[in-house]
Image (spheres, helix red, strand yellow):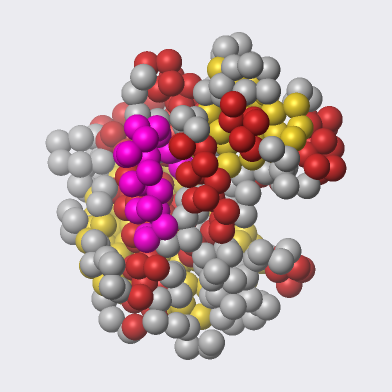
């Protein structure tokens, strides 16, 4: 039985406890840690967690005498790297909420600690693990059922009213790390990368149109992938009809998924190209109403499998870096007015240490 701990007793922590409970024959949450003792106790009572504490070091040592197998970091983004570092130094693997770090520089610091200690960090990118998403990823490419991808659309169009920014950590580059590009659309963009592979170049715009934030509340980008696929990416917190949407036009078919916070097979559809009945047949044969959709539970299951097998935890910090690099490039392109290539943002570039890079036009 894997003992895990949850760090942070806010709203997203509930999803982590439910995800572990879905694998109750293999794991349990043994403790919740929060800087607010009353919040920790209230969370533990609500979720049936045995221990509540403000002492992370004690929880990492094991309040029941057994060191935890995994620490779930569910705190505001600005705390992710120091908390993950403390866990790694104690020898406890980490599952950290998105974004894993406020900048590429911070992520590289954490990556160095992980490599030095030999302890893994996984990032919550749960949309990679849904049944239909895995099928589509496997089917895209020359000689595969869907053929080569050619054109793509990736939209995260959500709505957050002004009160959303009442939380003191929201709306700043220093604590939240960015707006919808960093904190919301990152999930869909990560799924897009899982489907299409590495990106190559981005040209973008960002704006603060309506919300009380120092960051953007909308961004738009055109991304060229290494295989030549051209994709548009839109991230918004201004959109009353909310949707999370990906469309990929490939040689044999168009595949689309529309959902909000998680998908099942029923959220996907395929439109075969003329004369490509084989693609439609392949899609219909694999549909499974009972198959797992995307969500924290499926990723936690994959992490438990990796812990049992002694393999790298999914999604690894190094994999997640490519997604964070795309986020940084969107901001950098938006704030410099020029295209940015993958891997271009390195030490010495202002966008390496802050997603705000050289500064926003509205600062």
Residue 114 lies in quadrant: top left
Quick check: 104 above or below 350? above
Q: Please check the rendered image and state whether residue 124 is part of the magenta-colored stretch, yes or no.
A: yes
Is residue 168 in sight in this rendering? yes
Q: Does the magenta stretch include residue 125?
A: yes
In percent of width and height, residue 47 lies at 77, 30
At horizontal 78% and vertical 39% (from top left) the residue drawn is 40
Name the dominant secondary structure of the magenta segment: helix
Q: Nearer the viewer, residue 31 or 244?
A: 31
Residue 44 position in % (x across, y down): 78, 31
Point 35% across, 53% down: residue: 108
Q: How many labels does the image show?
A: 0
Q: In which quarter of the image is the N terminus?
A: top right
Residue depicted at x 56% and y 58%: 78
Looking at the picture, how far across and down is residue 22, in whole percent? 62, 22
- List x then y, in percent, for residue 234: 46, 66
Q: Residue placed farthest to the left in the image?
A: 143
Which residue is at a point 76% across and 32% down the rendered structure image?
Answer: 52
Quadrant housing residue 336:
bottom left
Q: Relative to 42, is 210 above or below?
A: below
Left or right, 141 with reference to 221: left
Q: Is 357 or 273 nearer to us in this picture?
A: 357
Q: Can residue 281 be seen in this view?
A: no
Q: In which quarter of the image is residue 281?
A: top left
Magenta stretch in the rendered image: 104-126
């Amino acid at each position: 039985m894997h003992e895990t701990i949850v760090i942070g007793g806010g709203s997203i922590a509930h999803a982590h406890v439910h995800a572990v409970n879905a694998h109750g024959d293999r794991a349990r949450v043994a403790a919740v840690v929060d800087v607010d003792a009353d919040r920790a106790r209230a969370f533990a009572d609500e979720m049936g967690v045995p221990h509540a504490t403000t002492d992370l070091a004690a929880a990492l040592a094991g309040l029941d005498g057994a060191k935890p197998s995994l620490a779930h970091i569910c705190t505001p983004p600005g705390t992710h790297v120091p908390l993950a570092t403390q866990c790694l130094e104690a020898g406890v693997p980490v599952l950290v909420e998105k974004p894993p770090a406020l900048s590429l520089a911070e992520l590289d610091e954490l990556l160095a600690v992980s490599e030095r200690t030999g302890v893994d960090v996984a990032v919550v990118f749960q949309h990679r693990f849904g049944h239909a998403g895995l099928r589509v990823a496997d089917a895209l490419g020359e000689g595969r059922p869907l053929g080569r991808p050619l054109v793509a659309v990736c939209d995260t169009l959500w709505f957050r009213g002004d009160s959303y920014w009442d939380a003191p950590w929201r709306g700043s580059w220093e604590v939240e790390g960015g707006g919808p590009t960093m904190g919301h659309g990152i999930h869909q963009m990560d799924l897009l990368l899982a489907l299409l592979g590495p990106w190559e170049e981005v040209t973008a715009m960002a704006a603060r149109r309506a919300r009380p934030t120092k960051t953007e509340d909308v961004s738009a980008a055109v991304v060229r992938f290494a295989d030549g696929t051209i994709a548009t990416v839109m991230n918004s917190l201004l959109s009353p009809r909310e949707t999370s949407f990906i469309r990929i036009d490939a040689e044999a078919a168009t595949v689309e998924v529309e959902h909000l916070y998680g998908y099942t097979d029923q959220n996907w559809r395929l439109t075969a190209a003329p004369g490509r009945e084989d693609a439609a047949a392949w899609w219909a044969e694999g549909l499974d109403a009972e198959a797992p959709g995307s969500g924290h539970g499926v990723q936690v299951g994959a992490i438990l499998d990796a812990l049992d097998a002694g393999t790298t935890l999914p999604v690894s910090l190094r994999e997640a870096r490519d997604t964070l690099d795309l986020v940084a490039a969107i901001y950098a392109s938006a704030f410099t007015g020029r295209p940015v290539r993958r891997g271009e943002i390195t030490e010495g570039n202002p966008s390496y240490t802050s997603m705000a890079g050289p500064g926003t036009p509205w600062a």
